[in-house]
Amino acid sequence: MVTGGTRGLGAAISSALLHAGASVMATYHANDEAAQGFMRGCEEQGVADRLSLHRFDVADPEAVGRFFGGIDDSVEIVVNNSGIRQDGLLGLMSQQAWERVIAVNLTGVFNVCKLAVRAMMSTRYGRIINITSPSGRLGFAGQANYAASKAGLVALTRSLAREVAQRGITVNCVRPGFVLTDLTRDLSPEKLEQFRTEVPMKRFGEPAEVAAAVVFLASREASYISGAVLDVTGAL
């Protein structure tokens, strides 16, 4: 299961898991055009027979419950990738912008993990990978809501990892640096250049580079890694 799995970084993760042999349930919130475009791309690559698309809002616990109630097999791998930004200076930020970002980026992960671990406990196996951000560690101006959600995600990951450690379930974070996806394309060229110069490698990451880290943590070979945060940041 890859939330936000049909666009940008999520699409790269879904694709990498498909090519690694997994059957993938890619969720998305509203963009049917992008979801169908991703499906067509997978058809061209010959992996669409192991891909299913599911439209719902991870911030809605009832919708998440319907999803888990409607799938036939237990989920072995969950990648919580859904995330949004609604930037603004905290003193001017609307209540809606604060609550919506927290609802999707943090509460949405809670909603998914709550039901996923119940299923995984019965089989005593599972991999949960949560996608966080350097913003949660560094704190970027104008991103108090986003930074708070991503910092909270690390804490949630570490707490959950301890709770399920004896059940064959690992819970980790991947922390991508600056990667050119839909989440960053609305930034001005000046801001993008500023961010690029701050990265020691002096370049932005590729979605496939982040996806490779996710595939590793989702593998059986990563069985003794849990509660960790894997940076894919170009040394940021």
Image (tube, rainbow, N blue to C red):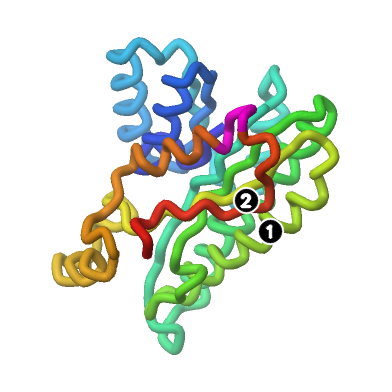
Lateral position of residue 167 relative to residue 14, left or right: right
Asked whether the viewer can see residue 230, the reply is yes
Q: Amino acid at mark 1?
A: Leu
Q: Depth check: give the residue in front, 230 or 51.
A: 230
Up/down of 57 relative to 132, above or below: above
Up/down of 145 relative to 53, above or below: below
What label does residue 109 carry, if any? 2
Q: Which residue is mark 1?
A: 156
Q: What residue sits 45% from the left and 11% below the top?
A: 49
Under tag 2, what secondary structure? Answer: helix
Under tag 1, what secondary structure? Answer: helix
Could you tell me residue 215's position as x and y percent?
Answer: 50, 33
Q: What residue sits 32% from the left and 35% below the top?
A: 34
Q: Is residue 151 magenta?
A: no
Per the rendered image, the range of residues in magenta is 217-221
Q: Depth check: give the residue in front, 201 or 189.
A: 201
Q: Is residue 218 magenta?
A: yes
Asked whether the viewer can see residue 55, the reply is no
Lateral position of residue 96 relative to residue 170, left or right: left
- Prevailing secondary structure class for the magenta stretch in the rendered image: helix
- Pick the quarter of the image with the N terminus: top right
Residue 23's quadrant in the figure?
A: top right
Q: Earlier in the sequence, mark 2 or mark 1?
A: 2
